[in-house]
Image (cartoon, grey):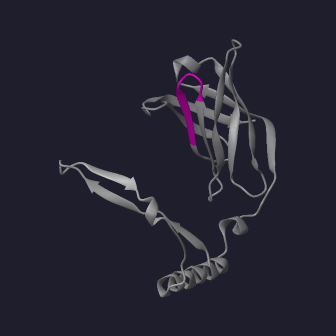
Amino acid sequence: MLPCVTLQYRVYHSKKPWQITLRKDTSLFKYNVHKGPVMKTIYSLAASLLALASLVPSAAQAAPLGNTGTYTNIVWSVSTTVPEFARCDELRVDVTGDLNNSSRYSVYGGLNCVDGTSYPVSGSAGFIKDGTFFMSLFISSGVALQCFNLNGLSGTCRITKTGTNEPLGTALVTFR
């Protein structure tokens, strides 16, 4: 049995009905150990719930634990219809995640251009159940590169403004 400390307060009304004052009534301070029939019912219900909860497997037990790994220097050739990126020809990224137990990964790297400019990119990528690849990357200039259903890691992607999803053009990515 657990002890319970009960503090009681008295309500004092003023002459104005909307004002109520609470004052701690120190003469009513009690230290009680609850042993009544209501508390016994609450304790038995809590014990039943704990026993039932121990029978249900937790999510942590169901998920296999894996080691995070990184693939480095993954490269796609890029050609785009967006004028800002017309001189960019290479997407070079690193991919990090649980490579054995997951189909979703963190992606980060750069969109490299022939004039030496490089735009940082970050986002996510992975494989869909049908075996196709998806990639959703944010480019530092407020633009998103969204590639869905890439067969053989190559295909056409949409380029949109981040936030408004306004289409800016397309990009053809070819895995090297």
Instruction: Identify which residue is drawn at 63% across, 59% down.
Output: 129
- Percent coordinates x, y for residue 99 in the rendering: 77, 51
Q: What stretch is highlighted in magenta?
A: 139-147
**Residue 174 shown left or right of residue 157 in the figure:** right
Q: Which residue appears farthest toward the bottom when viewing the image?
A: 37
Instruction: Identify which residue is drawn at 42% across, 32% down.
Output: 164
- Percent coordinates x, y for residue 40 in the rendering: 54, 85
Number of marks drawn = 0
The relative height of residue 100 versus residue 135 in the rendered view (above or below) is below
Q: In the image shown, does 128 or 48 lie closer to the viewer? A: 48
The relative height of residue 65 versus residue 119 in the rendered view (above or below) is below
The relative height of residue 170 versus residue 8 in the rendered view (above or below) is above
* Quadrant assignment for the C terminus: top right
Residue 131 lies in what quarter of the image? Answer: bottom right
Q: In the image shown, does 79 or 68 lie closer to the viewer? A: 68
- Percent coordinates x, y for residue 46 in the rendering: 56, 79
Q: In the image shown, does 21 or 174 lie closer to the viewer? A: 21
Residue 44 lies in what quarter of the image? Answer: bottom right
